[in-house]
Image (spheres, rainbow, N blue to C red):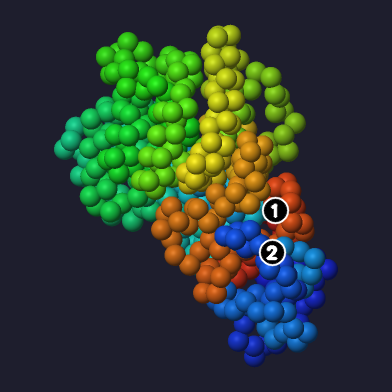
Amino acid sequence: MPILAILSCKNSEEKSAENSDFDLAITNIQIVDLEKGDILQNKTVFIKDDLISAIKDSEENTSAKKVIDGKGKFLLPGFWDNHVHFRGGDSLISANKNFLGLFLANGVTTVRECGGDMTRSILEWQQNIANNQLAGPTIYTSGPKLDGENARWEGSLEIASEDDIAPALDSLQKLETDFVKLYDSKFTGELYLKTIEATEDRGMISSGHMPFSVTLDETTAAGMDGIEHLYYVLKACSAEEESITQDVIDGKTSFWESLDRVMQTYAEETAEKTFTTLKSREVYVIPTLHINHTLSYLDEEPHENDEYLDYMGSGITKTYEGRIRSALNASEEFVKTRKQLDSAFVSLAKKLQENEVSLLAGSDCGAFNSYIYPGISLHQELQAMVDAGLSPLQALQTSAINGAKFLKKENTGAIKENYKADLVILNANPLKNIEETQNINSVIKNGKVFQQQDLEGLKTGL
């Protein structure tokens, strides 16, 4: 993928000042303050060496090597997709690498990669992006997932006994991963909790799925920092969570078989206690509403004409077949349950926000997750959050601001002096209409400005 030269936004004025202290100045711009929900009018943002050096009131004479006139436009931190995957084996490494351009073309300047089988490639991409040898988002990765014996996903580190925990965490620390991702397909409840405790003891950030053989209270008490998806929070809102958990332990039921009972026994009083626990323990929840709706309605909503199918390639689209086949062959009862879950998750997301539980916007895009396309799916997730009842401001806060807080990354995720200059210029105000997040004028990443023509080129790798 080519590295593009610094370009001005469409209809912007470039001024040359070779001796200036600043590489770039964005003048007359409206800054969207996502912490306060304010619009800061008529500002100039000065950038040097990929950092925001100063933010001042706009003046007529601005000295910088490049100047962009942002009049009538809105400046935001680059978007974060807080749940993505690079995976699919060696034959799909190139296809996954193409995702980097799709992210950037959609203003996604940072991704949280939640485990796969391409760790070596991801670490190489990380370095090349940081060195400006490759155009793409900053990648924060978990490295390999942790799971039990005979793990479902390729590349996972298996925890078959307590003796396996320390070596697995040692390997992740040697790789300098940004967090630990736990999966739930094969983990025993006991080993799952012990693994979280060991992660906590080492000061490592953890997130993951949750086997139904443990409760949410046990999981968060052990030190889990982030809950991926809403199945597990919904179970914790059931008045019968402990009974359901014991039935799973005893082999009387399973994850999917118990979901209807979970929904039927939802109790407001129990839910309130669960929300209080999540908030007090500072646990983040990643709702992934868009993928749940998409997979729940594969039998009704066609995707043959999706624009982004053209960018995926045959290798990626072939990985979609399993979920599609499963959805089309599912029993009528199972299809009904999936759609009921979709509605339950929408309601739950709003209640989590109302109860001040911290949320993260994540799309779960990548191979095997049918029709969840890198880049655009983050915008679809933000839209899904607003449709669930969050305000546009609240939805936007779940992306860059909360993403940086969760991973404890300093000087990024906001528009402030001495912060990383990962920025998106929009043509309209997203606080009034969340759809405007897709109305991208230009993207600034690693000191480069990508205007509309360049963003289209990133989609195709040209």
How many circles with numbers are drawn on the protein?
Answer: 2
Disc 2 and disc 1 in contact, CB within 8 angstroms: yes
* 3D distance between C-alphas at marks 2 and 1: 9 Å
Q: Sequence order check: which comes first, mark 2 or mark 1?
A: 2
Name the amino acid, label 1.
Answer: Leu
Q: Amino acid at mark 2?
A: Ile
- Residue that sits furthest to the front in the current view: 269
The answer to whether residue 30 is left or right of residue 365 is right
The answer to whether residue 387 of the structure is visible from this angle is yes
| Number of other residues with Cα within 10 Å of mark 2, as a class: few under 14, some 14 to 19, many 20 or more | some
Side of 233 relative to 213 (left or right):
right
Residue at the spot 78% in from the left edge and 84% down from the top edge = 60
* Residue visible at 23% across and 45% down in the picture: 198
Q: Report the residue marked by disc 1.
A: 431
Quarter of the rendering containing residue 325: top right
The secondary structure type at the circle numbered 1 is loop
Q: Tag 2's secondary structure? A: strand
> Mark 2 sits on what residue?
39
**242 and 195: which one is in front?**
242
Q: Is residue 313 visible?
A: no
Name the image quarter holding the C terminus: bottom right
* Residue 192 pos. (x, y %): 28, 34
Q: Position of residue 397 (x, y in %)?
A: 57, 52
**Quadrant where the image shows the N terminus:** bottom right
Observer-nearest residue: 140 or 250? 250
Q: Is residue 390 left or right of residue 87?
A: right
